[in-house]
Image: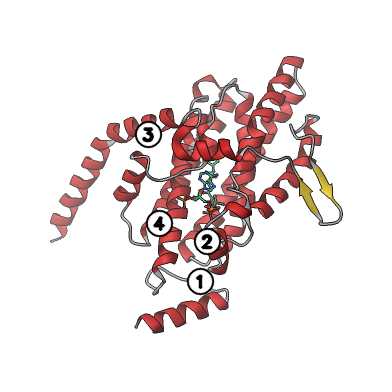
């Protein structure tokens, strides 16, 4: 049966078609997807914190309403992704426990502080921008529930990116102090946003297998240089600059060249030692325990309804 399953799986991948939850799949494929999708879900949930931090300080009612909607969207993405991850067999409470215990990773970017209102602009423009560049190809991921989830998530991320860009555009056209605040936010978020694409290809243990399985379609470095090319153009519209003196388009290779990133810092951040790791996890633990009554009430209600229909 295993041989038959493997043959069918190989054929589906070769046709660039989709694997669905009830299909046979190699254990490695299940494991890789569970890791990537749950890490992605955790990122969405932890990623609510830096922006939630600014909801009460948004400069106008309109900005506050937009930011609240954006943060709620991230919660939706997280729940959607946990559901996709669960179809691979690991229950949500187990995934959640991996996050709360610090065992599971989530995106490095969310371990940096959001210091000013302009950071809401930089996060929308650069962080959601990097998320889109990484996730558009994932819409074609071979695992059905993940690919389909990505379609909807990317649509919402595009709106998020525009709202971030628009915050920066307004600040860039404001007073000198506002312009400086926008530039400072870009200066702080540029390197961490580029690191969102993962380690360099030469140091990316999962890439080659994930590409053979049609989960990833492009390598980490390939997507990173594409993203740099996009923002290199967009920053001109803002009248601001990217903190990268080496940034240029290389005619010969048709690729964007950017500065070397600090991979020692990256490794420290994903190992739990970034500026906000402890604070982010602590906040999540508190939120989870404060939500216990909701989970208990929902379970009790479900049980009551099940008894009624018996
Ligand atoms: N941070 O071999 P690779 C968002 C880990 S967007 C932390 O290259 P892979 C939207 C990796 O897991 C952010 N860990 O791995 C939003 C692996 O761990 P292991 C989330 C990282 O999987 C915006 C190890 O390093 N997006 O949330 C990072 O082939 C605003 C080796 O790396 C996604 O998750 C990192 N940056 O490629 C929300 C996208 N990079 O096995 C709120 C889906 C790597 O040692 C506000 N994920 N690692 O435990 C992916 O596309 C891939 O997983 C990559 C990494 C590209 C991130």
Residue 54 higher or lower than 154, as above or below: above
- Asked whether the viewer can see residue 142, the reply is yes
106 or 154: nearer the viewer: 106
Q: Residue at x 43, y 54 (%)?
A: 35
- Disc 4 target residue: 85
C-alpha gap between disc 1 and disc 4: 16 Å
C-alpha gap between disc 1 and disc 2: 9 Å
- Circle 4: element type: helix
The numbered mark, 3 or 4, whose residue comes first in the sequence reads: 4
The numbered mark, 1 or 4, whose residue comes first in the sequence reads: 1
Mark identifier at residue 147: 2
Identify the image quadrant of the C terminus: bottom left
Residue 272 position within the rendered picture, expressed as x and y whole percent measured from the top left = 45, 36
Residue 95 position within the rendered picture, expressed as x and y whole percent measured from the top left = 35, 49
Q: Residue at x 59, y 48 (%)?
A: 199
- Disc 1 target residue: 18
C-alpha gap between disc 2 and disc 4: 12 Å
Ligand 1 within 8 A of label 1's CB? no
| Of the two numbered discs 2 and 3 in the rendering, the one whose residue sits closer to the viewer | 3
- Mark 3, other Cα within 10 Å: few <14 / some 14–19 / many ≥20: some
- Circle 3: element type: helix
- Mark 1, other Cα within 10 Å: few <14 / some 14–19 / many ≥20: some
The numbered mark, 3 or 1, whose residue comes first in the sequence reads: 1
**Tag 1 and tag 2, C-beta contact below 8 Å:** yes
Q: Residue at x 75, y 25 (%)?
A: 172
Residue 263 position within the rendered picture, expressed as x and y whole percent measured from the top left = 60, 40
The numbered mark, 2 or 3, whose residue comes first in the sequence reads: 2
**Tag 1 and tag 4, C-beta contact below 8 Å:** no
The numbered mark, 2 or 4, whose residue comes first in the sequence reads: 4
C-alpha gap between disc 3 and disc 4: 20 Å
- Asked whether the viewer can see residue 124, the reply is no
Residue 40 position within the rendered picture, expressed as x and y whole percent measured from the top left = 48, 49
């Amino acid at each position: 049966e295993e041989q038959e399953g493997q043959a069918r799986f190989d054929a589906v991948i070769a046709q660039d078609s989709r694997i669905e939850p009830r299909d046979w799949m190699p254990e490695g494929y299940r494991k890789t997807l569970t890791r990537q999708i749950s890490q992605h879900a955790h990122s969405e949930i932890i990623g609510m914190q830096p922006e939630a931090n600014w909801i009460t300080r948004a400069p106008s009612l309109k900005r506050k309403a937009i930011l609240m909607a954006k943060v709620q969207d991230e919660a939706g993405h997280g729940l959607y992704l946990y559901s996709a991850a669960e179809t691979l067999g690991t229950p949500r409470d187990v995934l959640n426990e991996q996050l709360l215990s610090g065992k599971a990773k989530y995106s490095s970017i969310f371990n940096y502080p959001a210091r000013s209102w302009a950071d809401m602009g930089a996060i929308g423009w650069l962080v959601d921008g990097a998320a889109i560049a990484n996730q558009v190809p994932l819409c074609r991921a071979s695992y059905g529930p993940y690919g389909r989830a990505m379609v909807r998530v990317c649509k919402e991320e595009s709106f998020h990116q525009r709202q971030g860009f628009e915050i920066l555009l307004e600040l860039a056209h404001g007073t000198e102090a506002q312009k400086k605040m926008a530039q400072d936010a870009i200066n702080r978020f540029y390197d961490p946003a580029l690191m969102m694409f993962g380690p360099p290809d030469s140091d990316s243990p999962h890439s080659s297998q994930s590409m053979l399985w049609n989960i990833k379609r492009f390598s980490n470095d390939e997507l990173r240089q594409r993203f740099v090319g996009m923002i290199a153009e967009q920053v001109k519209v803002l009248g601001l600059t990217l903190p990268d003196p080496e940034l240029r388009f290389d005619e010969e290779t048709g690729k964007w060249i950017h500065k070397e990133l600090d991979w020692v810092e990256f490794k420290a951040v994903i190992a739990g030692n970034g500026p906000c790791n402890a604070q982010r996890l602590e906040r999540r633990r508190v939120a989870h325990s404060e939500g216990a009554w909701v989970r208990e009430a929902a379970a009790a209600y479900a049980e009551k309804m099940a008894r009624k229909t018996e």
